[in-house]
Image (cartoon, rainbow, N blue to C red):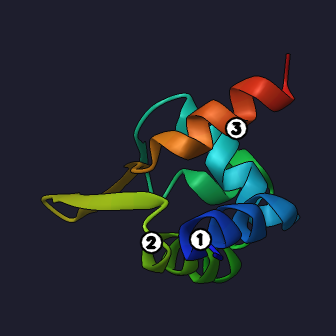
Amino acid sequence: MINEENIQIFKALSEETRYKIIKVLLEGEKCACEIPDLIGKTQSNTSMHLAKLQDWDIIKVRKDGKMRLYSIDNEKVRKILKIVEE
């Protein structure tokens, strides 16, 4: 049986920009305005990838005034990266 959640996690980790976003968010919650500079991509490109990661339930967003704050919402991602980076 195919686990769609696992497939989405590996799709996310296999694409460079999404991988960089996930790595940045593993350090803690970040504002959407600071993520592009941290990963070296444009705001529009970053926004597209953030939306995909959110659709896949890998990250979550909360609003604080005008800021959109993103964080990891899937513990499997944390576990996978911990194993891979040993």
> Do the residues bearing badges 1 and 2 touch, measured as CB atoms within 8 Å?
no
Label 3 vs label 2: CA separation? 18 Å
Residue 9: image quadrant is bottom right
Label 1 vs label 2: CA separation? 18 Å
Judge from the rendering whether residue 33 lies leftward or rightward of residue 84; answer left or right. Answer: left
Query: Which badge, 3 or 2, is on the more N-terminal residue?
Result: 2
Which residue lies at the image location 42% right of the left edge and 67% below the top edge?
Answer: 57
> Label 3: few (<14), some or many (≥20) within 10 Å?
few
The numbered mark at residue 3 is 1
Q: Give the residue pinned by disc 2.
A: 54
> Label 2: few (<14), some or many (≥20) within 10 Å?
some
Q: Give the residue pinned by disc 3.
A: 80
Locate residue 84, reporting x and y percent.
84, 31
Q: Kindly identify the amino acid type of the residue bearing the numbered disc 2.
A: Gln
Judge from the rendering whether residue 16 lies leftward or rightward of residue 30; answer left or right. Answer: right
Depth order, front residue of 84/16: 84
From what the image shows, is residue 60 above or below residue 46? Answer: above
Depth order, front residue of 76/21: 76
Q: Quadrant of the C terminus?
A: top right
Which residue lies at the image location 75% right of the left edge and 62% below the top edge?
Answer: 10
Q: What kind of element bears circle 2?
A: helix
Select label 3 or label 2 by which is in front.
3
> Label 1: few (<14), some or many (≥20) within 10 Å?
few
Q: What kind of element bears circle 3?
A: helix
Which residue lies at the image location 22% right of the left edge and 58% below the top edge?
Answer: 62
Residue 53: image quadrant is bottom right
Query: Which badge, 1 or 2, is on the more N-terminal residue?
Result: 1
Q: Kindly identify the amino acid type of the residue bearing the numbered disc 3.
A: Ile
Q: Kindly identify the amino acid type of the residue bearing the numbered disc 1.
A: Asn
Query: Which badge, 3 or 1, is on the more N-terminal residue?
Result: 1
> Do the residues bearing badges 3 and 2 touch, measured as CB atoms within 8 Å?
no
